[in-house]
Image (cartoon, helix red, strand yellow):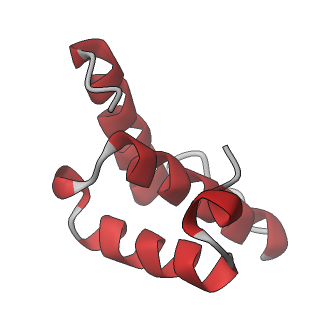
Amino acid sequence: MNGYEVCGDFEACHELMRKVVKEPLNASLTELRCTLFALQRHHRWNEYSDPEDHNVVQILRLIRVKVEKGALE
């Protein structure tokens, strides 16, 4: 999923990421996926890679829960 295309542009995608990181439990599957995309891009362009990044781990866990529950919107 290209979060930039889904959200409209870079700024909208990163604004969504900031919102979802603050309140991830209220996010839809699409919002979680866009957030994961934006976090990955952030890590890539800042040459930062931490597989234990709390935000990434939390977003991945929530995505898995939603998929397991069938909350695919």
Residue at the spot x=25%, y=57% of the render?
24
| Quadrant of the image containing the N terminus | top right
Q: Quadrant of residue 19?
A: bottom left
User: Taking 51 as reference, is 70 above or below it?
Assistant: above
Residue 61 pos. (x, y %):
35, 34
Question: Which of 23/44 is in front?
Answer: 23
Q: Quadrant of residue 13?
A: bottom right
Is 12 on the left-hand or right-hand side of 16?
A: right
The total number of labels drawn is: 0
Residue 72 pos. (x, y %):
35, 26
Is 11 on the left-hand or right-hand side of 44?
A: left
Residue 45 pos. (x, y %):
82, 73
Residue 53 pos. (x, y %):
50, 56
| Quadrant of the image containing the C terminus | top left
Question: Which of 32/72 is in front?
Answer: 72
Residue at the spot x=61%, y=64% of the render?
38
User: Taking 3 as reference, is 69 above or below it?
Assistant: above
Q: Quadrant of residue 54?
A: bottom left
Residue at the spot x=41%, y=54% of the render?
31
Residue at the spot x=43%, y=46% of the render?
30
User: Taking 10 as reference, is 73 above or below it?
Assistant: above
